[in-house]
Image: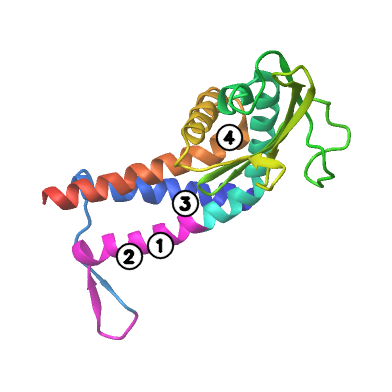
């Protein structure tokens, strides 16, 4: 945790320094000698480039540390919220998979180390991946003839509907909106959420500042 906080502070500090330099609210002057080599950096030209390289390395380092320290807790918070919200019904249409009337949610039918054995019977497993959101759960109820029916969502197979949503699916964007609405509320009252996302927001603001000021120069 201390390592994350240290890199976090450095990342935010450098991000603000770059914003100041590129917007003209901050400046550097003079030259910076390199030891006794007789070579000097021209500060106004070199410092922004040096800072950008260090800033990118810090951002990458922060991302790795925060993914290890904070993401598991954040994933658990989102998982728990999803399970009490009934959100899965908005993403996967029961009517389209053959349920004309009442139906219910059932826990994933196969053993999975990521799904707690003590999870409730209507547990929905939710994973956040790079450009993907993965679900594992089942619907059960009666089909149009009144017979019992299970429909499973997970890794796509002959007896399993595709439970993975990508940016090509509307459901993926619904997932992002669901996460954003939940995390914005938690941003300032849950340390892991603020620690993970606030530095990224400031870093992306720096990227936009650099791009916009470079275009208009």
Instruction: State whether residue 152 appears in this view.
Output: yes
**Does residue 70 appear in this view?**
no
| Residue wearing tag 3 | 10
Secondary structure of residue under mark 4: helix
Residue 81, position as x, y percentages in the image: 66, 24
- Residue at the image position 65 percent from the left and 16 percent from the top: 100
Q: Which residue is mark 1?
A: 54
Give the residue number, with chain letter if any, for mark 4: 193
Q: Residue at the top extreme?
A: 101
Report how far apart the C-alphas of labels 3 and 1 lie in the structure: 10 Å
Task: Please report the residue visible at 83 percent of the width from the left and 26 percent of the height from the top.
Answer: 121
Along the horizontal axis of the image, is 109 left or right of 39?
Answer: right
Quadrant hosting residue 115: top right
Report the residue at 73% width, 18% height from top: 145
Q: Which mark is residue 50?
A: 2
Reading the chain from its start, which is encountered first: label 3 or label 2?
3
Outermost residue, right side: 118
The mark that comes first in sequence, 4 or 3, is 3
Q: Magenta segment: does it hold 45?
A: yes
Q: Residues within 10 Å of mark 2 (few under 14, many from 20)?
A: few
Hey, which residue is sitting farthest front in the picture? Answer: 145
Q: CA distance from mark 1 to mark 2?
A: 6 Å
Secondary structure at badge 3 equals helix
Q: Secondary structure at mark 1?
A: helix
The x, y position of residue 17, in whole percent, is 32, 49
The magenta segment is 35-60
Is 149 or 126 nearer to us in this picture?
A: 149
Foreground of the two, 210 or 126: 126
Residue 162 is covered by the magenta coloring: no
Q: CA distance from mark 1 to mark 4?
A: 25 Å
Q: Closer to the N terminus: mark 3 or mark 1? A: 3
Q: Is residue 13 above or below residue 176?
A: below
């Amino acid at each position: 945790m201390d390592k994350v906080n240290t890199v976090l502070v450095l990342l935010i500090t450098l991000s603000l320094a770059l914003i100041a330099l590129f917007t003209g609210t901050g400046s550097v002057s003079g030259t910076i000698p390199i030891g006794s080599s007789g070579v000097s950096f021209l500060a106004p030209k070199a410092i922004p480039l040096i800072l950008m390289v260090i800033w990118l390395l810090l951002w990458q380092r922060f991302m790795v540390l925060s993914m290890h320290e904070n993401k598991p807790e954040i994933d658990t918070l989102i998982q728990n919220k999803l399970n009490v919200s009934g959100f899965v019904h908005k993403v996967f249409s029961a009517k389209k998979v053959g349920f004309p009337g009442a139906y219910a949610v059932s826990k994933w039918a196969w053993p999975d180390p990521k799904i707690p054995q003590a999870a409730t019977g209507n547990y929905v497993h939710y994973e956040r991946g790079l450009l993907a959101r993965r679900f594992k759960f089942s619907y059960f109820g009666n089909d149009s003839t009144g017979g019992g029916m299970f429909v499973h969502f997970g890794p796509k197979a002959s007896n399993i509907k595709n439970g993975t949503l990508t940016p090509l699916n509307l459901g993926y964007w619904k997932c992002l909106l669901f996460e954003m609405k939940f995390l914005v509320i938690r941003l300032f009252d849950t340390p892991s959420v603020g620690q993970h996302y606030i530095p990224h927001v400031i870093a992306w603001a720096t990227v936009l500042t650099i791009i916009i000021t470079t275009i208009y120069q």
